[in-house]
Amino acid sequence: MLGFVVFALVRWLPGPPPTYETWRAWMSSSGTAVAFAGFGAALLAHAWVGLRDVMMDYIASLALRVASLALLAAALLAIGAWMVVILGRAILG
Amino acid sequence: MAQTAHLDAEPAALAPQRRAKARPAFFDLLQIQLPVGAVTSILHRVSGVLLALAIPFGVFLLGLSLQGAHGYAEAAAVFGRWPVRVGLVAVIWALSHHLLAGLRHLLMDVDLGSRLRSARRSAWTVNLAAGALAILAGVVLL
């Protein structure tokens, strides 16, 4: 994740992409797409570990904890699917 | 001392299983003093939750920016609004703190800087560096 953050900052911090075409060409180039896919997977896995720890620490009731963890897992999976759709559309058309 | 009275008394509000352990409860926030490492640690957690909450917004903006020239212009315009810029500064602080504190933890895991003196120094460094980056972001964006 740190690698992707540095990669994106080095590319775009000097000046944001001037046009939509520049931006889409960069996001859908194979190097960026692969790097972003890895970044997204690592991000969601890390969000799971971190938020799971927070919920395990602060939600005392077992039923409420299990429900919250299930909701979190569903939300993260949905966000993952959303990312796949966005990246897929950028690459394909 | 007034403080020891707190330690003996059990607040009735605590759940029964908590009361069974009879752990001392002392919640006077004005008197509790956290060591600097504890401040770094709790801010690591706070910044992590903040970053996690920012994920859906980031994914939404990414999707919008890739929807076409019109969507790209809309996504760019979102960053022109001041509440969004304030949020962006908060996210930049959270990312800075979370990254630096995370690296500090990783280094400690391989036994670098885990002695008290250097741990306190690195904790101060993380807290101040993240604050400095947030101020820099604030100056640029606000």
Image (cartoon, coloured by chain):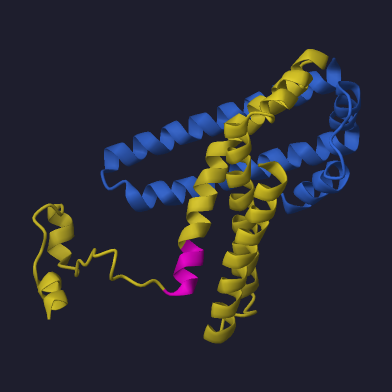
Chain colours: A blue, B yellow
Q: Is residue A17 above or below residue B15?
A: above
Could you tell me which residue is drawn at 61 percent across and 33 percent down?
B82
**Side of B79 relative to B17 (left or right):** right
Residue B33 rendering spot, x and y as whole percentages: 35, 72
Residue A84 visible in the shown view: no
Q: Is residue B59 above or below residue B19?
A: above
Marker count (numbered)? 0
**Side of B79 relative to A78 (left or right):** right
Residue A60 rendering spot, x and y as whole percentages: 27, 48
In the foreground, B111 or B5 = B5
Secondary structure mostly seen in the magenta stretch:
helix
Q: Point out the image quarter for the C terminus of chain B.
A: top right
Residue A57 in magenta?
A: no
Residue A24, picture quadrant: top right
Residue B88, picture quadrant: top right
Residue B126 rendering spot, x and y as whole percentages: 61, 67
**Side of B117 relative to B21 (left or right):** right
Residue B40 in magenta?
A: yes
Magenta-highlighted residues: B35-41
Residue B1 rendering spot, x and y as whole percentages: 12, 81
**Side of B102 relative to A53 (left or right):** right
Residue A66 visible in the shown view: yes
Residue B64, picture quadrant: top right
